[in-house]
Amino acid sequence: MKTLHERAYRAIKDLILKNTLLPGEELPINSLAGTLGISHTPVREALARLSADGLIDYDPHKKQRVATITEEDIRQVYEVRRLLEPHAANQVVSSISNDPVLEENVRMVHKKAKEIYKAPVDQINFEDCLAIDLGLNDIFVGAAGRTLFCAVLAFVGDRSLRIRTFLEAASKGSPNQIIHTITEEHLEIIRALLNQDATEAKKRVLRHLKNGETRTLKAIRKKVKI
């Protein structure tokens, strides 16, 4: 059974990673405790732990706030992803022909991505696009097996979720063409995986990450002053 502290930690962390709680937003203990239906103590413990994770700016004598997202944060996340994800894509290619479950998962994500890509631009949303991105991440993690690489990839994926969803939060009201573009990049990666073309898969992953970094840096410069 999860402790109250663990429950508070996971709930608040999820809100931060998905940018439901935005960078710079205050985290009143009274409000959080009321929302979660628990006392102040486990919330304080959760905030201290989230501070150690680098997700909030915590000072027991000041108002707690969601940690800012800086341009350097974005660059570091994408730098690490560029080191890890091409290798992860290569592992998928190496395993897919002998792993029916992995292949089925790739085909399911492929089907969803095609549906988004073919839909009218005014009928698609960032949440669907993010689901494809996270689905690819799960495929990469799954193909890595129970290894140190898998643990590192999962850790980075968790950290990068906040960067990924930040683009959505910062792009509210923007044309949905950006979703169409991102989905096209996802499809290019998935097709290369299904074709078992490691060279092409790694190339498309790197292209997607380069473009993602550019899009997110542009969003933070345009919309957020933190």
Image: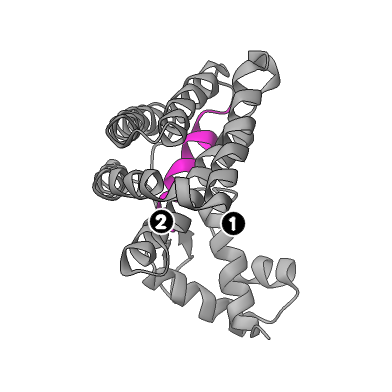
**Circle nearer the N terminus (2, 1):** 1
Dot 2 surroundings within 10 Å: few (below 14), some, or many (20 or more)? some
Residue 103 x, y percent position in the rendering: 54, 45
The tag on residue 109 is none
Rendered residue at 51%/54% (across/down):
17
Distance between the Cα atoms at labels 2 and 1?
Answer: 13 Å
Q: How is the image coloured?
A: one colour
Residue 70 x, y percent position in the rendering: 32, 45
- Left-right relation of 64 to 173: left
Q: Is residue 94 above or below residue 214?
A: below
Residue that mark 2 sits on: 159
Whether residue 200 is visible, yes or no, is yes
Residue type, mark 2 in image: Arg
Q: Is residue 152 magenta?
A: no
Rendered residue at 42%/64% (across/down):
145
Please, what secondary structure does the residue beneath circle 2 have? helix
Residue closer to the observer: 58 or 109:
109
Please, what secondary structure does the residue beneath circle 1 have? helix
Rendered residue at 32%/69% (across/down):
148
Residue type, mark 1 in image: Leu
Residue 114 x, y percent position in the rendering: 60, 24
The magenta segment: 157-172
Whether residue 24 is visible, yes or no, is no
Residue that mark 1 sits on: 15
Residue closer to the observer: 109 or 220:
109
Q: Quadrant of residue 1?
A: bottom right
Q: Main secondary structure of the magenta part?
A: helix
Q: Is residue 166 magenta?
A: yes
